[in-house]
Image (cartoon, rainbow, N blue to C red):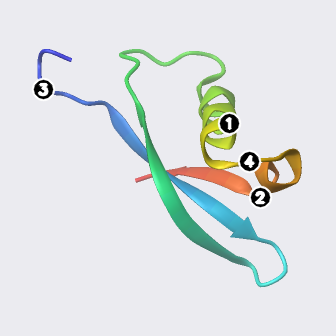
Amino acid sequence: MTDGNIGRVYTVYRLDHERMTREPIGEIVERRKSSRQANATGLLQLARRKFSSCTDEALHIGVLED
């Protein structure tokens, strides 16, 4: 962006349901200027595509805002 504002940063986690822990594995930056109806769903789908290699692994991916 030209104004230097990169948007909101979300940390992507791998969730371990057995041990009830989460391990940070990366970040996603939301560059939208306005809120939309499916923001959270869209970010989660993007994180799952980017940080998982199979469907089983994608089920253990989560996103939290920093």
Query: Is residue 33 shown above or below 14?
Result: above
Measure the C-alpha gap from mark 2 to mark 3: 33 Å
Measure the C-alpha gap from mark 4 to mark 3: 33 Å
> Of discs 2 and 1, which sits in the foreground?
1
- The residue at which mark 3 appears reads as 4
Q: Where does the image place residue 25, in percent across and percent down from the top left?
A: 53, 61
Image marks 2 and 3: residues in contact by CB distance under 8 Å: no
> Of discs 2 and 4, which sits in the foreground?
4
- The residue at which mark 2 appears reads as 60
| Marking on residue 49 | 1
Residue at left 48%, top 54%?
A: 26
Measure the C-alpha gap from mark 2 to mark 4: 11 Å
Residue at left 48%, top 19%?
A: 35
Query: Is residue 42 shown above or below 22?
Result: above
Q: Callout 1, which amino acid?
A: Arg
Which secondary structure, mark 4? loop
Which secondary structure, mark 3? loop
Q: Where does the image place residue 3, in percent across and percent down from the top left?
A: 11, 18
> Of discs 3 and 1, which sits in the foreground?
1
Measure the C-alpha gap from mark 3 to mark 1: 27 Å
Measure the C-alpha gap from mark 2 to mark 1: 12 Å
> Which mark is first along the chain, 3 or 2?
3
Q: Where does the image place residue 24, in percent across and percent down from the top left?
A: 52, 65
Give residue 50's quadrant in the image. top right
Q: In the rendered view, does 17 fall on the left or right side of 49?
A: right
Q: Residue furthest right?
A: 56
Residue at left 44%, top 49%?
A: 27
Q: Callout 2, which amino acid?
A: His
